[in-house]
Image (spheres, helix red, strand yellow):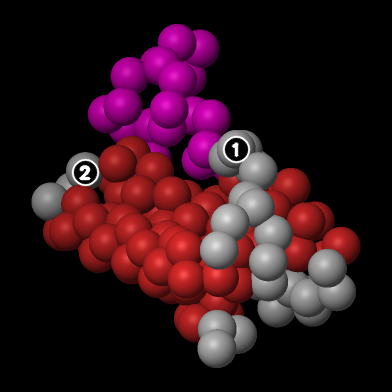
Amino acid sequence: MKKDNFTSDVKTWLAFAEYDLKSAKWQLEGKIYVSACYSSQQAAEKALKTLLLENGKVPPKIHSLDRLVSALKKIKIDVSEIESDARELDTYYITTRYPGQYGGPEGLYDLEDASEAIASAANILTFVKRRLR
């Protein structure tokens, strides 16, 4: 991959992370809490993948924030300030994607869950932005 494409990808991934966080905030206002949690997890996932790209790594095709945090640790990025946020958001990556054993979307998550998810995603996005060139 050429350096120019890398830079473009970093900007694109960051733009999508910001867009997902914006979507989560709108969903919170609309009381669509499960979707707000999902979009928050997506924002954090894309933000962490942005940081991997920024550091010359191709992001793995996974959803687990814990595994993305581990990948960042392997390249010597101190992620201690966002680890609890990533763990919080990791609880949403399966339940918001796959219906079935978790029941329907109504009542699965509430205002408090969605608000906390958005706050965690915003913390991760801020963390990533501070580390971009």
In the image, taking residue 31 as reference, residue 56 lies left or right, namely right
Which quadrant is the N terminus positioned in? bottom right
Span of residues in magenta: 91-115
Q: Residue at x 33, y 19 (%)?
A: 104
Q: Residues within 10 Å of mark 1 (few under 14, many from 20)?
A: few
Q: Residue at x 47, y 63 (%)?
A: 5
Which quadrant is the C terminus positioned in? bottom right
Tell me the residue that label 2 is attached to. Answer: 32
Residue 114 part of the magenta segment: yes
In the image, taking residue 66 as reference, residue 24 lies left or right, namely left
Tell me the residue that label 1 is attached to. Answer: 61
Residue 34 location (% of width, % of height): 33, 39
In the displayed structure, 27 sits above or below 127; it is: above
- Helix, strand or loop at label 1? It is loop
| Type of amino acid under label 1 | Lys
In this rendered view, identify the residue nearer to me: 3 or 89.
3
Q: Main secondary structure of the magenta part?
A: loop
Q: Residue at x 17, y 59 (%)?
A: 26
Residue 27 location (% of width, % of height): 20, 52
In the rendered image, is residue 14 in sight?
no
Residue 18 location (% of width, % of height): 33, 67
Q: Residues within 10 Å of mark 2 (few under 14, many from 20)?
A: many
In the image, taking residue 31 as reference, residue 86 lies left or right, namely right
Work out which residue is located at the far front of the displayed protein and give it: 2
The mark nearer the N terminus, 1 or 2, is 2
Work out which residue is located at the far top of the displayed protein and give it: 100
Q: Quadrant of residue 132?
A: bottom right
- For the residues labelled 1 and 2, the Cα–Cα distance comes to 27 Å
